[in-house]
Image: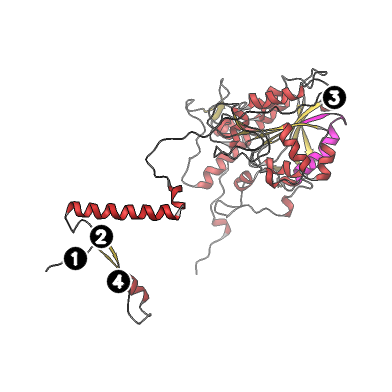
Amino acid sequence: MFRRKWSGLPADPDFPVDLEKLGYFINEDDEVRAIDNPDNYFHFFLNRSPRYNERQRYAFSQALQYVIWERLEKLGLEKVLLPLGTSDANKPHVPIFASNDILTKSRVVVIFGETTQDLGVLAHRVIGGQGGVTKGSMVSIVSALQKQSCSTTQQTPPGIILANMGELIWWPEGKRTLSRTAFAAAPMQSAVHYNNVIEKENMVEKNSTERIHVGHIFQEVIPHFLKDDAKIDIIVVGDSTDFVQEFLDLPPMWDIWKKRINCLAIAGGLCPVFYLKNDEFVEFLKKKARAYALSVEPTGMVISGPEGNPRTSTFTQMGCPIFSSGEPNYTEKVLITGSEIILGWLEEVAMTSEGKDYTNPHFHVEFADPVFDNDEPDWSQWKNDEHASQKDGNVEAQAKQDHEGTGNPEVNEPKLVLLQHTGQHTDDTEQSKKENVKIGQNKNKN
């Protein structure tokens, strides 16, 4: 009898978490290129085995993340382990980044990235491709924010907190958390095991899900690091919008935070306003929030007001003014492409004269999707039964006229004939179905 031992399974591919050993370097344009051919970017398809390719990308992404973390630390951010009070890095924890002088700031920008991205990453397609490491990561956003001022009375740059919405799965062997994609590509017992299984020991206290992580940031992290009178700007990217707005929509939570939040910038999010139940929070969205959507229109074009825009196919029922981000395709690139107008608006709100309350101006929206001329029929007219009957009559008259014009009876001969089975027996159903369809029609030999 055939018996296969565990030792006989192919070993899981192993790659070093080091750019140089993987065969890559960062050139003078800050782009990752292949050492053997500097004209080439990252090469994913090294092998026919998907597992082999995923393991290489896992090591590549981990190596780049350490480069990003090093750059963030050089910009004055330090890593903080959650839940608060965690000092042993070998125990389950979720890392975030916060400004090392955040206690002195009167304004702090809190950024919630996508739930599919690693901490510090905006878009791997930019980090590992055209654009480079800084542009495709939070390094570019932090650098831009540090050129702003906290307010009209405090000229120092605002504080920054980078939440970690993506890496919430604890990997005991690596002593760190991973995203779902990275956890699936983490080392397994063999190359043919099905997948790494998420179990109870992979959960981090107070940070086991995106929803719970958002609550921990608002209820414990922000009160711990910020002064009581410090104002907050919030940036949400992609699907993190749902979790942040869901939290702030809770009346007890909104009663606490409504006086501290300056504004909310939504980069590529799509949380419908009709899902929200707190009228006060909905009013806040109208006055102090802006959304930046995927669009082929120029960056900064007004797509919709708070009431929505029925003249465009873009989703506009978000309860706040919506602008084009200038990014037509990828949600992960919205904050990259639209960083100038998004961060510029945050500064505009922050620099509102002391004693005045910022409110979105009224936007006169003229935008509508372009209409292209084509020969397609207007199918909406067929909703009218009387009109449809009239159309049917016209079609029949036209067919009769065509037949009389040609004088050829073979013109209207059908090419596909469906015959109804008239037999009394039902046992031969499948056979009868085959006999019911005959392609072509024999001509009358008489």
Q: Is residue 392 above or below residue 62?
A: below
Q: Is residue 247 above or below residue 9?
A: above
**Mark toward the viewer: 4 or 2:** 2
Which callout, 3 or 4, points at the residue further toward the start of the chain?
Answer: 3
Rendered location of residue 13, percent (x, y): 55, 45
Which callout, 4 or 1, points at the residue further toward the start of the chain?
Answer: 4
Q: Which mark is residue 415?
A: 2
Indicate the quadrant where residue 417 lies.
Answer: bottom left
Indicate the quadrant where residue 331 lies.
Answer: top right
Q: What is the magenta range? A: 212-232
Q: Is residue 138 visible?
A: yes
Left or right: 196 as drawn, with respect to 416: right
Residue type indicated by callout 3: Thr
Considering the numbered disc 3 on the image, is that residue within a helix, a strand or a loop? helix
Give the prevailing secondary structure in the magenta stretch. Answer: helix
Left or right: 444 as drawn, with respect to 386: left
| Mark 3–mark 2 distance (CA, rounded to whole Å) | 83 Å
| Mark 3–mark 4 distance (CA, rounded to whole Å) | 85 Å
- Quadrant containing the C terminus is bottom left
Bin the neighbour count of mark 1 within 10 Å (Cα to Cα): few under 14, some 14-19, many 20 and up.
few
Which callout, 4 or 2, points at the residue further toward the start of the chain?
Answer: 2
Which callout, 3 or 2, points at the residue further toward the start of the chain?
Answer: 3
Q: Given contact means CB atoms under 8 Å apart, are the residues at marks 3 and 4 in contact?
A: no
**Mark toward the viewer: 3 or 1:** 1
Residue type indicated by callout 1: Asn
Q: Which residue is mark 1?
A: 442
**Mark toward the viewer: 3 or 2:** 2
Considering the numbered disc 2 on the image, is that residue within a helix, a strand or a loop? loop
State the residue at coordinates (87%, 29%): 229
Bin the neighbour count of mark 4 within 10 Å (Cα to Cα): few under 14, some 14-19, many 20 and up.
few
